[in-house]
Every structure is written in C-alpha cells, then in structure tokens.
Amino acid sequence: MNDLTVGRPWTALWRFSLPMFISVIFQQMYSIFDSAIAGRYAGEDALAAVGASYPITMIFMAVAVGCNVGCCVVISQYFGAKAFESVKTAASTTLAAGFALSVVMTAAGLIFSKPLMRIINTPANVMKDGTLYLKIYIGGLTFLFLYNICTGIFTSLGDTKTPLYFLIGSSVGNVVLDYVFVAVFGWGVGGVAWATFIAQGVACVLALVSLGKKLGQIETERRPAKFSAGMLRRITLYAVPSILQQSFVSVGNIFVQFLVNGFGSSCIAGYSAAVKLNTFAVTSFSTLSNGLSSFTAQNYGANKPERIRAGYKAGLVMVAAVAVPFIICYFLFSDTFIGLFLDSGGDKALAIGSQFLRIVSPFYIAVGIKIMSDGVLRGKGAMLYFMITTFSDLIIRVVLAFVLSGPFGEKGIWMSWPVGWLFSTALSVIFTALQLRKSKLKIMEQNF
C-alpha cells in the first residue's frame, strides 16, 4: 500500500500510475484480440455481431466503473486521512451493494437483451450472434462488478501492482481461450463470449481472496462495521454521477451505433474494429486519469492542495507522452491496424475503419488533457463540473452525428467526435483551474 501524500509528487504519481497503464494495455489487447479472432476465424459478420452488441455491454460496464469510482474516491480520502476503520467499512459496504446491484442487472439484461439489439437497428444477418454474445456477457456481470470494485479498492490503497498481476493473467487466459474456442473448436461468437466469461470469473475470485488478505493487514482500534447505510450514501454521492456520466456516454454510443448500423454490416465491422482501437487510446488516458484521481483524493483528504497542483502538471506530461505514439500509429498506419481484424475480402470495412482513425486520432492530446483534468475534478469531489464536461462532449457529438451523417454519410459521424472533444476540453481545463485556484486561496488564508 502506497501513501501518495508523501514524497515527490511527480515520482509518486509516475510510480503509482505505471502499473495501471500496463494493466490497461493488457486489458485492451485482449479486447482487441476478441474482435480480431472473431473477424479472422469466424468472418466479417461475426466481427459485426460483437461490435453491434458493444455499446449495450458498455451500459453495464458503466455501472461497474461507477461503483469503482465511488469506492475509490471515498476510500482514498479516508486512507489519506488515516481513518482506517472507515476504509474497511467503505470496502465491505461497496462489495455488498455491488453484488446486489449486479444480480438485479443480470436478471434485467437477460430479459431485455434481444429487444435492446432490435432498438439499435441491428441487421438481421448479425442479430442472432449479437444477441448470443450479449446474453453470455450479461451472465458474467457479477464477476465484472466485483472485480471492478476490488480494483478500485486496491487503487485507493495505493496498490496498483496486484490488479496488474490479475489482469495480465486474465488477459492472457482470455486470448488463449479465444483462439481455442473459435479457431480450434469453431464456436464462433459464442466462443469469444465464453472466453471472456471464464477469464473474468477466475480473475474476480482471485481478486476477492487477495483483497480480503490486504484489508486484514490494516489494523484498527475497533472492529469496523461490515455495512453502513451512511457510508453507502457517501459512496453513492460519488458513484451515481460517475454512473450517470458513463451511462450517458453509453446511451450516446447506442445512438451512434444506430446510425452506423443503418449503413450495413461492412460499416459495422469497420467501425467495430476502429472503435476498439480508439477505445484502447482513450482508456489509456482514462487509466492515467484514475491514477491522478486517487492521488488528488488522498492529498485532498490529507489537506495538501499544493501536491494536487504538482500532480496535475505531471499528469498532463504523462498523457501527452502516451497520446503521441497513438496519433502516429493510427494516422499513418491505420490500414495496417484495421487489417488485423479482417480476413481477405473486407476492403469496404477496412476503408471505413481507417477513415475513422485518421479523422479522430489527431485530437488525442486534446481529449487526453480533458480526461486528466476530469481526474482532478473527481478526486476533489467536484462531480457537477465533471458531469457537465462529459455531457457537453456527448451531446455535441451525438447531435452532430445525426446532422452530418445525412450529407456526408458515415464520414459525418466520425467528424462529430473531434468537435465534441475540443469543446469539452476547454470546459474541463477552465473548471480545473478554478478548483486549483480555490485550493491556492485556502492556503493563503491559512498562512495569513
């Protein structure tokens, strides 16, 4: 466990965030291999089926990530303040609530999986496989929820290495099972889904066992409560805005998917490949932002705002260093990367996916700055500002996608992304500057 309130801010943040960044590389690589194996060994329609269900799976992921953020911010603040009894109560409360929520969402998801696929205008030739993939994915929601909560608790305690080990094992296992189930056994889309289900389940169980041992090492004067309604309310204050933000993004992506689906299965396949690569980049930025959020929360709890400003500067350098390689690879070698997902004969899908990457990738530094700024806002508990920046991005993106897809076709959908990113980046930077200035004024008042 790492105390992020001591030591040089730059060094502490880099060391803390590096394992998280390596984790996301493995996580996104297995996600990419999921789609690549489906496309190469089961065909373009299989890739389209996985891609068509993707925005719906992201709704469930949004809730899981919201639980992660809620417990991470609260526990980080308690850990920074050395309130270890509250740390344990917050951890057990989040796990119990997350389990109950996952059961409810699993039941609802299994019932409404096919109607959801119809709502997003899924073509008939990919409907069956897309629904199958979605149902198997939903069956593993409890694993997804509990694993994300465990990861959030580990991160809030300053431990980013343990989740890395689990994620490496899970990702490698997932890729191996993908190949065996799809290329060897010929299970198609179902094989891709079952590989994820099994790998995620094993990682979840191991994470729970390890977390129990980790929390057992923290000594407290009194026996902490296993569940606290007051603690759940506080976690919810942080989790709900994040869930709404993530869900709103997912719902917006469903509207985008609806437009994409109207252009046929080749467009769906190309977009599916490109959006997986784009998600790799954006999730990398988000992971660094999560590290900055924990750093900010611990130092906010310890009343050390000067370290928050230093951490923010370090975070901006980190995200720029990560964004540049993505820009170079996706802009100059887009055909090569999209080609990893397709077998021969997918020329139209290849052209569409490459077009998407060349339009959005030049703006990665801007969106990276926005996401790192959001990390500071989350860590300080400025959730209203955080939600405003995200919603403005999405609303602009979705509205423009509908407007521009008429005259420009699918290219108009891709053109809407940079506009939303640039506007929300400006808002995030302004809001973060206001929050950092507020901290500076408080320090001056205390010194006076």
Image: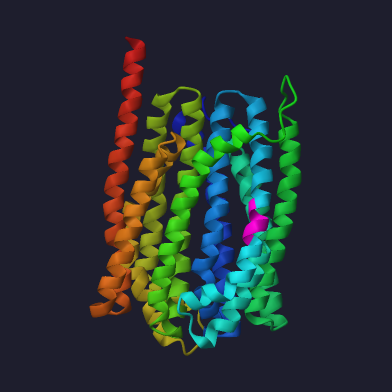
Q: Is residue 317 left or right of residue 91?
A: left
* Magenta-drawn stretch contains 104: yes
* Magenta-drawn stretch contains 413: no
- In the rendered image, the vertical position of residue 86 relative to residue 64, given as above or below: above
Image x and y of residue 423, in percent: 26, 53
Quadrant in the rendering for residue 267: bottom left
Residue nearest the observer in this picture, 398 or 194: 398
Which residue appears at 55% of the width and 82% of the height? 127
Part of the protein shown in magenta: 101-105
Image x and y of residue 424, in percent: 30, 51
Q: What is the quadrant of the C terminus in the image?
A: top left
Quadrant in the rendering for residue 359: bottom left
Which residue appears at 63% of the width and 40% of the height? 154
- In the rendered image, the vertical position of residue 143 relative to residue 17, given as above or below: below
Main structural element of the magenta stretch: helix, strand or loop?
helix
Which residue appears at 75% of the width and 32% of the height? 216
Q: Is residue 393 left or right of residue 144?
A: left
Q: Is residue 397 left or right of residue 336?
A: left
Image x and y of residue 67, in percent: 57, 47
Is residue 14 among the parts visible in the rendering? no
Is residue 217 among the parts visible in the rendering? yes
Q: What is the quadrant of the N terminus in the image?
A: top right
